[in-house]
Image (tube, rainbow, N blue to C red):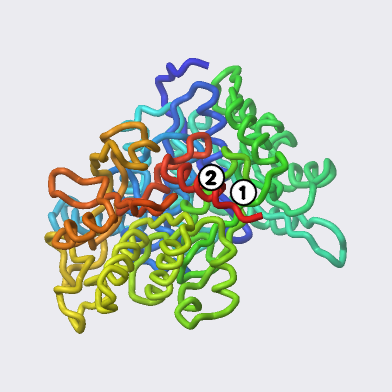
C-alpha cells in the first residue's frame, strides 16, 4: 500500500490486569507490521509518572534510560519502538505527567489561561491531546502508535484514559483504534487459563468510556477457540479481534505471530485503509536465524545490577542480534563486579570461562574496582573486551595503573573529595560540568560526530571515517594523559573534533580491546547489528573456548 493518506490515524495501546505484560513490544510489533505495509509510522509513549523524564530513576524501578538522537532521556520502550520500526524518534515521542504539569503550571504563571481555574479537564487533558496531535502533524505519519504506560485503573493514569476517550470523540472511529493488552493467568490446580481478569480489566476500561476494538491476550500457555469466543462475548468485541499473544522464545517473533492472525488486515479494516499486504521477509529471515541450532557464545557482563536485564536491555538486545547474525546463541554470564573485588571464586571462574567480556555504562563508585579487575584480566589474557561509556573509562584507568604501578589513578567521579588528587584523575569532568550541577537532564546527551583514524580496528568495522553516535555521560578522558597512553600502546582512534574529546580507544597488539565513550547499543537494530557489537562478537568467536 502506498503511503498517501491525508488523515493521520491513531492507535492507542493500553494494558490491563498487571504491569510488565509487554505493551511496548506489542505497540512496536504492530508498528513494524503496518510499516511493512508501506505506511509511515510514528510512536510515542504517555507515561503517568510525575518525573519529568526517567533520567534520574533507579534502574531497579525503571530499567535503562534510553537516549534518543536529540538527547531526550526516555523510557526503555522507546528502544523497542526504534529497534522494531526502524525510525529514529525525538522528544515528541516521550510524554510524562511531570512534563505536562510543568508546562501547564508555567502557562498559568504567564497568565495564559486568563485567570481561569486550572483543572485536569480541560487543561491537563488538552495539553496531553496537543502532544498527541503534534506528534502526528510534525512526523507527517500515516499512523501514530500511542502506548499508555501503567495499568488500567491506576489513579495516575486516569487523565490519559480520559484524553484518548476525547480523541476518539474528536477524530471519530475511522481514525482511532483502541488495542487492549491483557493477561490470561494459568491456574496450575485447575490446569486452565482464566478469562475473568480480562473481563474485569475491559469492564474497568469501559467505565472510563473506552471500548477496546482489539484485545491481545497474553498467556504462557496456548489459548483455544472456546476461550476466544468467551472473551469476545463478555468483552463485546469481534471474535477475530481477540488476538493470541503467547509467550514466545524471542520478542522478534511477535510481529510474525500477529501477522499469522491477520492483525494487519483487522487494523486496516477498522481504520478504513483498504487491503494491505505486509512484507515481513526481513522478520522471517531473522526468525530463521533465531530458531536455527547454534553454538553458544559465552559473554560476561560485568555489572553492579546483576541479573537485572532491564537495566542493560539495549546492550543485551545488541549482543543477541549480533550473535544471531553470526550463527551463535548468546549465553550471558552475569558477574557482580563487587564479587570480583572480594575475589569470589565463582565470579572469577565465570570471568575465566568467558569468550568475551563487556563492561557497560553506569554511574557511581560501587563495584568499579571489580570492573578494573575484569579489564586487567582481559588485557593480560588477550580476552576480547568491549567497554561502553564507563567501560571505556575503566579501561583507561586500569591501563594507567598498569603503566605506572600506582593504584591512585582513578576517575574524578570516584574521587570527588580529591583524596588521590587531580593529578591522578585519568577521567575528569567534561567542560562545564561539576559536582554541584543538577543531576537531571544536564549530562552530555544525544548525537555527536566522531572522526576515526584510518589505521584502526574501529575504522575497519565502520567502513568510514566520519560517524555519529549517541551519548549520555558527565565525565571524559583527561587529555593530559593522551600522549602518555599513546606512546605505550593505548590509542585514541576516535575523536570529537570540535572539542578534541576522545570517543574511541583501542589497545594495540590485542585481538579486541576497545572502549567507546558513546552508547552504540542505541543504534543497533535487529536486522542491522551495530559495527562495534559485530566486531566484538567476531573476536569473541575467534577466542571461543571448546
Residue 37 location (% of width, % of height): 54, 23
Residue 253 falls in which quadrant of the image? top right
Q: Are marks 1 and 2 in contact (CB under 8 Å)?
A: yes
At mark 2, the secondary structure is: strand
Residue 498 location (% of width, % of height): 13, 44
In the image, is 210 to the left or to the right of 496? right
Q: Quick check: can you spot residue 377?
A: yes
Q: Residue at x 43, y 74 (%)?
A: 370
In the image, is 389 to the left or to the right of 104? right
Residue 21 location (% of width, % of height): 61, 55
Mark 1 burial class by Cα count in 10 Å: few <14, some 14-19, many 20+: many
**What residue sits right under mark 1 in the picture?**
181
Residue 402 falls in which quadrant of the image? bottom left
Mark 2 burial class by Cα count in 10 Å: few <14, some 14-19, many 20+: many
Residue 90 falls in which quadrant of the image? top left
**Along the line of sight, the residue nearer the viewer: 383 or 466:** 383
Q: Quick check: can you spot residue 217?
A: no
**What residue sits right under mark 2 in the picture?**
13
At mark 1, the secondary structure is: strand
**Along the line of sight, the residue nearer the viewer: 362 or 138:** 362
Amino acid at each position: 500500500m502506498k503511503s498517501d493518506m491525508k488523515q493521520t490515524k491513531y492507535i492507542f495501546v493500553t494494558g490491563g490486569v498487571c504491569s510488565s505484560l509487554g505493551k511496548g513490544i506489542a505497540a512496536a510489533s504492530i508498528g513494524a507490521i503496518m510499516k511493512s505495509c508501506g505506511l509511515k509510522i510514528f510512536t510515542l509513549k504517555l507515561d503517568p509518572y510525575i518525573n519529568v523524564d526517567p533520567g534520574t530513576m533507579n534502574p531497579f524501578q525503571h530499567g535503562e534510560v534510553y537516549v534518543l538522537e536529540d538527547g531526550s532521556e526516555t523510557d526503555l520502550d522507546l528502544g523497542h519502538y526504534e529497534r522494531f520500526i526502524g525510525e529514529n524518534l525525538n522528544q515528541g515521542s516521550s510524554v510524562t505527567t511531570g512534563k505536562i504539569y510543568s508546562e501547564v503550571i508555567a502557562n498559568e504563571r504567564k497568565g495564559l489561561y486568563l485567570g481561569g481555574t486550572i483543572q485536569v479537564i480541560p487543561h491537563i487533558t488538552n495539553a496531553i491531546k496537543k502532544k498527541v496531535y503534534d506528534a502526528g502533524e510534525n512526523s507527517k505519519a500515516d499512523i501514530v502508535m500511542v502506548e499508555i504506560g501503567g495499568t488500567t485503573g491506576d489513579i495516575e493514569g486516569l487523565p490519559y484514559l480520559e484524553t484518548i476517550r476525547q480523541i476518539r470523540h474528536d477524530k471519530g472511529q475511522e481514525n482511532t483504534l483502541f488495542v487492549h493488552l491483557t493477561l490470561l493467568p494459568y491456574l496450575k490446580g485447575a490446569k486452565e487459563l482464566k478469562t475473568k481478569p480480562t473481563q474485569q480489566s475491559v469492564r474497568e476500561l469501559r467505565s472510563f468510556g473506552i471500548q477496546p476494538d482489539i484485545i491481545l491476550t497474553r498467556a504462557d500457555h496456548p489459548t483455544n477457540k472456546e476461550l476466544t469466543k468467551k472473551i469476545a462475548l463478555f468483552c463485546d468485541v469481534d471474535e477475530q479481534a481477540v488476538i493470541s499473544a503467547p509467550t514466545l522464545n524471542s520478542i522478534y517473533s511477535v510481529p510474525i505471530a500477529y501477522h499469522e492472525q491477520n492483525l494487519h488486515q483487522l487494523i486496516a479494516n477498522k481504520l478504513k485503509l483498504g487491503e494491505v499486504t505486509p512484507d515481513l521477509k526481513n522478520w522471517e529471515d531473522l526468525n530463521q536465524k533465531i530458531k536455527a541450532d547454534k553454538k553458544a557464545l559465552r559473554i560476561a557482563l560485568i555489572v553492579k545490577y546483576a541479573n537485572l536485564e532491564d537495566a542493560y536491555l539495549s546492550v543485551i538486545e545488541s549482543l543477541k542480534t549480533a550473535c544471531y547474525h553470526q550463527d551463535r546463541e548468546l549465553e550471558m554470564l552475569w558477574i557482580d563486579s563487587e564479587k570480583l573485588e572480594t575475589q569470589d571464586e565463582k565470579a572469577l571462574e565465570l570471568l575465566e570461562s568467558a569468550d568475551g567480556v563487556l563492561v557497560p555504562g553506569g554511574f557511581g563508585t560501587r563495584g568499579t574496582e571489580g570492573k578494573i579487575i575484569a579489564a586487567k584480566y582481559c588485557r593480560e589474557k588477550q580476552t576480547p573486551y568491549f567497554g561502553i561509556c564507563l567501560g571505556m573509562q575503566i579501561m583507561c584507568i586500569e591501563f594507567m595503573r598498569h603503566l605506572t604501578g600506582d593504584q591512585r589513578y582513578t576517575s574524578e567521579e570516584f574521587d570527588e573529595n580529591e583524596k588521590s588528587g587531580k593529578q591522578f584523575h585519568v577521567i575528569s569532568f567534561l567542560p562545564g560540568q561539576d559536582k554541584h550541577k543538577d543531576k537531571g537532564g544536564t549530562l552530555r546527551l544525544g548525537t555527536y560526530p566522531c572522526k576515526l583514524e584510518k589505521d584502526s580496528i574501529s575504522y575497519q568495522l565502520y567502513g568510514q571515517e566520519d560517524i555519529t553516535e549517541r551519548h549520555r555521560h558527565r565525565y571524559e578522558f583527561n587529555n593530559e594523559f593522551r600522549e602518555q597512553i599513546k606512546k605505550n600502546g593505548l590509542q585514541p582512534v576516535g575523536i570529537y573534533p570540535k572539542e578534541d574529546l576522545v570517543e574511541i580507544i583501542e589497545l594495540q597488539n590485542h585481538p579486541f580491546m576497545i572502549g567507546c565513550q558513546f552508547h552504540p547499543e542505541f543504534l543497533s537494530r535487529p536486522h542491522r547489528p551495530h559495527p562495534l557489537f559485530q566486531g566484538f562478537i567476531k573476536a569473541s568467536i575467534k577466542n571461543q573456548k571448546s
